[in-house]
Image (cartoon, rainbow, N blue to C red):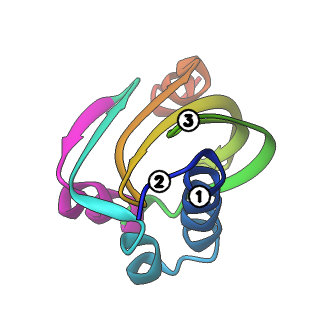
Amino acid sequence: MMTTTTSAKYTVMSFLKCLNEEEFEDARKYTDDDLKFEGVLGLRNGAEDYFNDMNKMKLKYHLLKTFADGTDVCVLYDVLMGGISIFACGWYQVEHHKITSIKVVFDPRPLLHLQNGN
C-alpha cells in the first residue's frame, strides 16, 4: 500500500505520541530499521541507535504545528530537554508507512549553557 500525505502525517503523529508516552517499543513500529537521524548535536544511523538514545533522554514534545507534503512531514514543537523547553523543527520522511529519515533543527545554546553551568 502506497504512503499518502495523510498516512505519512498519521505515522509521524503516532510516532511522537508513543515517544511522549515513553512507549518506545510501539514507537519503534513506526520507523524503518535503517532510520537516519540528523540533529544539531549529532547523527544516528539505524533505529537501534536512535532508540537507545531516546530511551535515555525521554524527551517530551509539545506539538505546535504540523505540515505534510507528499511523504514529507514537518513538525514545529517545543521539546523538553534537560528541564529546558526548546523550540525545534523536525522534518520526517516516510516510505511504506515507516519513518526513514528525521532531521531536527533548534538553537542548542540553552543546552550548552546548562552543560557549562551558566
Which label number is shown at residue 7?
A: 1
Would you call the spot at circle 3 few (<14 residues within 10 Å), some (14-19), or many (20 or more)? some
Q: Position of residue 43 (x, y in %)?
A: 24, 33
What residue type is disc 2 on?
Answer: Thr
Which residue is painted at 56% across and 17% down in the image?
109
Which of pointers 3 and 1 lies earlier in the amino acid sequence?
A: 1
Cβ atoms at labels 2 and 1 below 8 Å apart: yes
Q: Is the N terminus in the top left, top right, bottom left or bottom right quadrant?
A: bottom left
> On the picture, is 50 further left or further right than 77?
left
Q: Main secondary structure of the magenta part?
A: helix
SS under mark 3:
loop
Q: Position of residue 69 (x, y in %)?
A: 62, 31
Q: CA distance from mark 2 to mark 1?
A: 6 Å
The residue singled out by tag 2 in the image is 3
What residue type is disc 1 on?
Answer: Ser
Residue 71 vs residue 77, the one in the foreground: 71
User: Considering only vertical position in the picture, is 113 above or below 18?
Assistant: above
Q: CA distance from mark 2 to mark 3?
A: 8 Å
Which label number is shown at residue 70?
A: 3
Q: CA distance from mark 3 to mark 1?
A: 10 Å
Write the start and end of the magenta stretch as one range: 42-55
Q: Residue furthest right?
A: 64
